[in-house]
Amino acid sequence: EGRFNRVPLLLGSNENGGSIFEPMLPIVLPGVRLPVKRFPETLDIAMRYFFQDNVSKVEAVYSQKEFGDGDKLIKRMIRDLIFMCPLRALASAWFSSGLPTFLYVFDFSYGLAKWIGLGDFHGSELPFVFRNWLEFIKPIDPFQSPRHMSDIISCTWTSFADGHDPNGGTNESKWLPGCQDIHGRYSAWPSFGPDRFFYTLKAVPEVHGILADNYYPDDTFPRDEKCDLWDQLGMYMPWVHEEVTQDSQRSLVV
């Protein structure tokens, strides 16, 4: 039995958490060129390099037929392997230990960032967490309120830190200052359990469950088949990289 600090846990990631890492492929993988739409051989090279004897297992779950093109496939694969599926495993383990667990996906849907293929990329929630640079986010998506999104994150996260409940608890008189409009307006954030609910942090937060049969683009959280794959392969993958050549560093084509 593992030993760990038995405390409530709030954990999550971003809906497009792999998008900023795909452009870095030429840095770690010699000889590839981007975008994959123009250089489809890059997908085959990356698959063989990273997954070696397990390529057929990965291709059976991540197919271009589902995603439409290799760039979207790679971004989702990175997201699921590094972020989303470890979250499923950790939330499940925490719940199995009888501890309160709250899972989220940040899904603000940046307008311009989504249009250029980045979406809610890794780290894009930080301005809302710390209430910094919100004035620069507004021009990126003029139809949403960054300050309102920041209010949602501030109230749910600080309420969790204060009382181990992102909803602020059942006693409204003890809700943190300024959080009445947030806690009283939106769906309650359920704890992770047998239904495997997660909370989408967006302009109007929603409650969803991890599913067994959802496909891109309806994959705010990856389906079980994908996470089962990474549970099986992730920790055993040979992360060995060759020295990157000067030519490979120049291979990003826009």
Image: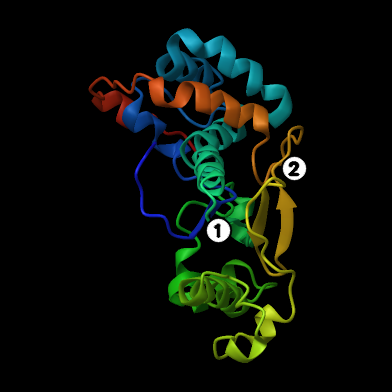
The residue located at (46%, 7%) in the rendering is 53
The residue located at (49%, 43%) in the rendering is 90
Looking at the image, residue 83 sits to the left or right of residue 145; the answer is left
User: Is there any visible trace of residue 250 in the rendered image?
Assistant: no
Q: Name the kind of residue labelled 2 in the image.
A: Asp
The residue located at (77%, 32%) in the rendering is 213
Report which quarter residue 120 is drawn in. Answer: bottom right
Q: Is residue 217 above or below residue 40?
A: below
User: Is there any visible trace of residue 215 in the rendered image?
Assistant: yes
Write down the residue under mark 2: 218
Q: Is residue 88 above or below residue 67?
A: below
First in sequence: mark 2 or mark 1?
1
Which SS class for mark 2?
loop
Write down the residue under mark 1: 100
- Report x, y in % for residue 211: 73, 39
Which quadrant, please, contains the N terminus? top left
Q: Name the kind of residue labelled 1 in the image.
A: Pro
- Report x, y in % for residue 12: 53, 53
Q: Is residue 188 above or below residue 116?
A: below
Viewer-proximal residue among 105 and 55? 105
Disc 1 crowd, CA 10 A, few/some/many (<14, 14-19, 20+)? many
Looking at the image, residue 31 sits to the left or right of residue 127; the answer is left
Viewer-proximal residue among 64 and 53? 53
The number of numbered badges drawn on the structure is 2
- Report x, y in % for residue 166: 58, 70
Is the C-beta separation of discs 2 and 1 under 8 Å? no
